[in-house]
Structure formats: structure tokens, C-alpha cells
Amino acid sequence: MIADRILFLVLDGISDRPCEALDGLTPLAAARTPVLDRIAAEGVCGIMDSIAPGIRPGSDTSHLALLGYPPQEYYTGRGPLEAEGTGIHMTAGMIGFRCNFATVDADGLVTDRRAGRISGTESLSEAIRDTVDLSPLGLGFRFESGAGHRAALALTGEGLGDKVSSNDPKKDGVRPLTVLPCTDEPADQKTAEACNEFIRQSQEILFDHPMNVRRMEEGLPPGNLLLIRGAGNMGSFPQFSERYGLSGSVISAATLISGIGKVVGLEHVPVPGTTGSVDSDLDAKVKAAIGELDRKDFVLMNIKGADEAGHDGKGILKRDFIETIDTALEPLLALSDTLIVVCADHSTPCSVKDHSADPVPVVFRGPGVRTDRTARFDEVSCAEGGLHRIRGHDLMPIALDLINKSHKYGA
């Protein structure tokens, strides 16, 4: 028997390093995960370098690699992908940025780069769209809220470049930076000028916006500054269906992942109640993925909350959310004719509070898969599995072969 469809489950940032709060275990090893363990026991396991050993992958470059689009060839910056995920249709030549709503105090110092992980920022975005004016520079823009504190900006017009810096100081307690051109090219200078003007005008709007006034009255950090980074010039991507001969969907609350899926031609399936955080409705997400498998050959499902817990350095919260994930995944065990691929896109150690180059666990489970002796889904157990150590760009070729869709190399 051979599977005829693929569920590609990316547990964002789930991999970690030993945590003092968990007696030297990783959150994944410390968690009770009977479903993931059964998938591991019924599959073939290994560990994976998303890009290459020693390379710290971003969520953008790692997902491109996992889908078989080498980031060295296709990556032009996170901004355009994030923008596409928020609903901004990016066309070739548009300059995109990822954004955070952040908090600055009366002295102009950044006090929270994520504005208390603010959410529901649509009214802030609407005020920016209605009021900011870049026409004196001969430019237009698109701006949309994403999940939580995230948003995206796209600049439109002639003579724009993407080689510019960010105003994000990357830490609290300091002033935001000035966006600078990274070259002497007039196009990059024009983009830097436009970014600084956009930031200036939007901050005036955000400062006394009713939502932020209310948040301050409630003792919550206001979203009164935009931090913009990840500039990129929108490129072109071969479509997934043409590359692999498979129809596909993407299910993700993270706008970046939705954007990556959309630019390669996967249909984005929105799921109400999913947030990209630890309060996400995972049952709804799993139900949607199972439904998509009835009409598509390939479904990419990203679950992100563990990554946020890692960035916040909260090992116990990360362990507990991993257990929540595991419970939600139980309906997947009943799937037939389905190759289930489970992995992380990168490690997000609580001790680092950022991505690391540590390899991540991976498992293929489905009809016809040669199983190994691994019975636990964690960083160390999977390292003893039959896949051994692979790279992210190996995933799709292996998956295609396991559903008998790969092409013979040679006669």
C-alpha cells in the first residue's frame, strides 16, 4: 500500500536545548506526547538541519528550504513574504517589509518591541492607511495587520530599492534607529527616506489613537511605534503544482508562513480561532487540515505557539503547550492513505530566546514506510532513527518517493 497524499506538519520552533527549569530536559523531551511518540514509533525518524549544519535559519528561509525552494536561490528578504501573508498582493518590483507594533515611552525609548504582544490592531492599521501620505515622494503604500503584534508594509512606485536598514534597535531601553540606505544607489536612498517618513507620520497617528489611549488607561503597553525590517524586493517563484505535480493548501495563523505558501501557489485556508500563539484553537486547525486532505494532495500545517514560548524564554509554558499540541493531533492517527511528515523548522532554545542552529527532529509516518526502533519524538531519540541526519531540502524528495511520485534518475 502506498500513500497518495501528504500532510506536512511543521511544529514551529519546537526543538530546544536542556532547560534548568525542566531538570536538564528539553521542553519536548519533558512533555507527555503519546500521539507524537506513536507517530515516531510507527514511522522512520531522524534529525534535520533546515539549511545546513551550523546555520541559524529564519522561519522564512527554513520554510522555503523545507518546501524545496533553496533560499540561496529564491530568498529576497522576509518583508515581501510577510506582506503577501497579510493579504497584500505582491507583484515583481514591490518592496515589502515586516513590521511590529511596539511601545515607546515619553522619552522616546523603546520599552516593549512587541507592545505586550498586542492583538486586534486592525483599527490602528486602518488609521495609518487613511492618514499617512507618501505622495510628495511620488510613492504609494499598502499596510495591513498580521497576527498579534505583527504587520506588513509594501511600498509602490518608481525608483525604489531594497538595500536599507531597519529602525528596530533589537532591544528595549534605547531609542529606535533611523532607517539608512545600505548603498549609495539613489533607489536605496529613496526607500530609506520613504521609510523614515512613513514611521514619522504613523507614530503621530498611533500616539493618541483611541485603542492606545484605552490600553494605557488599562495599564497595558500601547502600540505607538512601528518597527520595520526585513526589506526585500518581490521576486518570482515556480509554482508548487508545476514543480511537484501536486495540488496543495497552507494552514497557518502566521502571516509569514501563509505568505510563503501563497507565493508558491498553495491555497491559503483561514481557520477562525487560530492565533499563532499558545491560545490558538488547534482542534479547529487539525480539523481544517483533515478536510483539506479530501481535496488536495498536499497540506502544509504550521503550529507556532511553542516558538513564541521559546522566544520568551518560558520553558515550562513551552512544555505545556507541546502537550496541548499533542492532544490536538490525535485525530491524525486515523488518517489512511496519508504520509504524515512532522518536523520543526528550527530550534528556538529558551536559553537563547532566539533561533539556533541545533538540528530538529523529523519523522515520516505512513503506509509502506520502513520503521526504525525509535519510539519517542524528541531531539535525542530521533537522532538514533533510520533517517539519520538530513537537510531541509531533502524532505520533499523523500516525501515524493514515499508516495511514488518521484522521477527516476537515470535509465
Image (cartoon, helix red, strand yellow):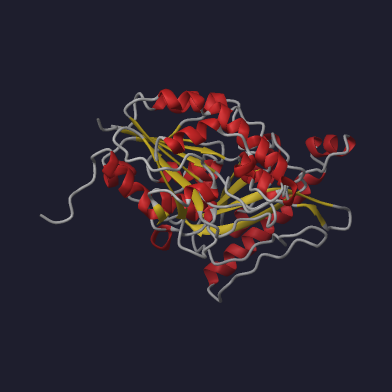
Q: From what the image shows, is residue 107 above or below residue 271?
A: below
| Total marks placed | 0
Vertical position of residue 130 compared to residue 395: above or below = above
Instruction: Give the quadrant of the C terminus.
Output: bottom left
In the displayed orientation, state which residue is furthest to the left: 411
Front one among 67 and 90: 67
Q: Quarter-wise, where is residue 352 in the image?
A: bottom right
Which residue is nearer to you in this view: 401 or 246? 401
Can the viewer see residue 293? Answer: yes
Quadrant in which the N terminus is drawn: top left
Q: Position of residue 14 (x, y in %)?
A: 58, 45
Q: Quick check: 243 left or right of 173? A: left
Q: Which residue is at a point 50% across and 27% down the rendered structure image?
A: 286
Q: Decide if residue 234 is on the left or right side of residue 324.
A: left
What residue is shown at x 45% (from left), y 28% (from top)? 289
Rendered view: 80 above or below 191: above
In the image, 409: left or right of 85? left
In the displayed structure, does residue 18 sit left or right of residue 207?
A: left
Q: Position of residue 354 (x, y in %)?
A: 64, 55
Which residue is pictured at 53% across the width and 74% down the height?
Answer: 185
Q: Is residue 111 above or below residue 123?
A: below
**Residue 107 picture location, percent across and down:** 88, 58
Camera-side residue of 272 and 319: 319
Residue at 45% x, 46% y is: 362
105 or 35: nearer the eye?
A: 35
In which quadrant of the rendered view does residue 178 lie? bottom right
Can residue 275 be seen here? The reply is no
Q: Position of residue 374 (x, y in %)?
A: 45, 43
Which residue of the protein is positioned furthest toward the bottom in this rendering? 184
